[in-house]
C-alpha cells in the first residue's frame, strides 16, 4: 500500500521498512519485493547481488514472480554470472505455475536456442500460454510467428489478430507493426489512414521506427495532409537516444539499424531544403518540447 500510495501517501522508505521486517520472517512476497528494491535502487543503494540473494530466498519457497526475476538476473548476468541454463531452469519453474511473464520468456529462450535447443514448436506452446492470459508481449510474439511463418504456416490474418490484441493493450511494438500491416495491406485491405493511426500511437511512445515512418507519411502526404514541419520533427525524434544497433522485437525499441538511421538523416536533410528557416525552427522547437506518452 505504501509502495503504490493506496490509502496512504506513497512512501518507498516505509514500504522498504515493512518489507524488510516481513522478509526476515520468511515471507516470500516480501523477499521478492525487497529484491526488486535492490535491483532498481529504490531507497537503497542499487545492489544486484543483494537483489539476487532475496529473489533466491523467495524463489526457493516457490514464489513464481521471484523465480522469474531470478531467471532474468541469470539471463542478463546481473548479480550472478550470465547463465542461460540457470535462467531457463527458473523460467520453467515459474512458467509451470502459470506465470505469464515466465511463459513468454521461456518461449523466447526456445526461439533463440538459449540454454536449450532451438525449437519453434515449444516456443509457440509457451508463448500461447502467456498470450491466452492476455500478456501483450506474448501476443505480439505469436503475431510475429504467424507473420513470418515461424513454427506455423504463414497467415497474415492470424498475425493481424494477435498484433491487434497486443496493440489494443498499448504495446508499442504491436501498434507499430499493426500500422505496417495496414500500410502494406497484409491480412487486411490497405488503409493508410488506419496505418497512420497505429503508427502514431507507437511513435508517441517513442518507437523510433514508427517515428521514422510517420515522418515519411507527412513528407509524402499519405494518410495525412502533407506537412513538412511534422515530417522534419518526426525524423528528428527518430534519431534521438537511438544508437546504432539491430532492432529487436523484445529489446529496446529506441534502437534502429544503421541503415535506418542513415535514412532518417537523409530524409530530414532532403525535406529541410524544401522548408523555410522559420519552418525548420518550428520543427526543431516541436522536437525539443516533445514528450513520450
Image (cartoon, helix red, strand yellow):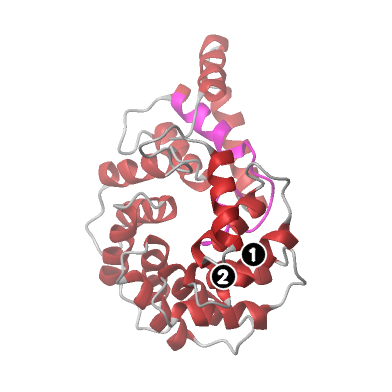
- Main secondary structure along the magenta-highlighted residues: loop
Magenta residues, start to end:
230-255
Specify the quadrant of the image occupied by residue 186.
Answer: bottom left
Q: Is residue 242 magenta?
A: yes
The front one of 80 and 13 is 13
Work out which quarter of the rendered image holds the N terminus and state it.
Answer: top left
Location of residue 255 in the rendering, given as x and y in whole percent from the top left corner: 61, 50
Q: Residue at x 54, y 49 (%)?
A: 18
Q: Which mark is residue 54?
A: 1
Location of residue 83 in the rendering, given as x and y in whole percent from the top left corner: 71, 77
Judged left or right of residue 155, residue 51 is: right
**Secondary structure under the numbered disc 2 in the rendered image:** helix
Specify the quadrant of the image occupied by residue 97.
Answer: bottom left
Query: Dot 2: within a 10 Å radius of its alpha carbon, few (fewer than 14), some, or many (20 or more) residues?
Result: many
Q: Is residue 91 magenta?
A: no
Report the Cα–Cα distance between label 2 and label 1: 6 Å
Judged left or right of residue 63, residue 257 is: right
Q: Which mark is residue 146?
A: none
Depicted 261 relative to depicted 154: above or below: above
Q: Residue at x 42, y 62 (%)?
A: 137
Query: Dot 1: within a 10 Å radius of its alpha carbon, few (fewer than 14), some, or many (20 or more) residues?
Result: many
Name the residue tied to disc 2.
58
Location of residue 223 in the rendering, given as x and y in whole percent from the top left corner: 30, 38
Total numbered labels: 2
Amino acid at each position: 500500500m505504501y509502495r503504490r500510495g493506496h490509502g496512504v501517501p506513497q512512501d518507498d522508505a516505509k514500504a522498504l521498512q515493512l518489507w524488510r521486517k516481513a522478509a526476515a520472517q520468511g515471507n516470500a512476497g516480501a523477499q521478492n519485493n525487497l529484491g526488486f528494491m535492490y535491483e532498481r535502487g529504490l531507497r537503497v543503494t542499487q545492489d544486484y547481488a543483494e537483489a539476487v540473494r532475496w529473489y533466491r530466498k523467495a524463489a526457493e519457497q516457490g514464489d513464481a514472480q521471484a523465480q522469474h526475476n531470478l531467471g532474468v538476473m541469470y539471463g542478463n548476468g546481473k548479480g550472478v554470472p550470465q547463465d542461460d541454463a540457470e535462467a531457463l531452469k527458473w523460467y520453467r519453474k515459474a512458467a509451470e505455475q502459470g506465470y505469464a511473464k515466465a511463459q513468454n520468456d521461456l518461449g523466447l529462450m526456445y526461439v533463440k536456442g538459449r540454454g536449450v535447443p532451438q525449437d519453434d514448436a515449444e516456443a509457440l506452446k509457451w508463448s500461447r500460454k502467456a498470450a491466452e492470459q492476455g500478456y501483450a508481449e506474448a501476443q505480439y510474439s505469436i503475431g510475429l510467428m504467424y507473420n513470418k511463418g515461424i513454427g506455423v504456416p504463414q497467415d497474415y490474418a492470424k498475425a493481424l489478430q494477435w498484433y491487434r490484441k497486443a496493440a489494443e493493450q498499448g504495446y508499442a511494438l504491436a501498434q507499430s507493426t499493426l500500422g505496417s500491416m495496414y500500410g502494406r495491406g497484409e491480412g487486411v485491405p490497405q488503409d493508410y489512414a488506419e496505418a497512420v493511426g497505429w503508427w502514431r500511437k507507437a511513435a508517441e511512445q517513442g518507437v523510433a521506427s514508427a517515428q521514422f515512418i510517420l515522418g515519411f507519411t507527412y513528407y509524402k502526404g499519405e494518410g495525412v495532409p502533407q506537412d513538412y514541419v511534422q515530417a522534419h520533427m518526426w525524423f528528428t525524434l527518430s534519431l534521438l537516444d537511438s544508437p546504432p544497433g539491430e532492432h529487436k522485437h523484445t529489446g529496446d525499441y529506441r534502437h534502429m539499424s544503421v541503415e535506418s538511421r542513415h535514412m532518417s538523416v537523409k530524409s530530414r536533410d532532403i525535406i529541410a531544403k524544401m522548408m523555410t528557416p522559420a519552418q525548420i525552427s518550428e520543427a526543431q522547437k516541436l522536437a525539443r518540447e516533445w514528450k513520450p506518452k
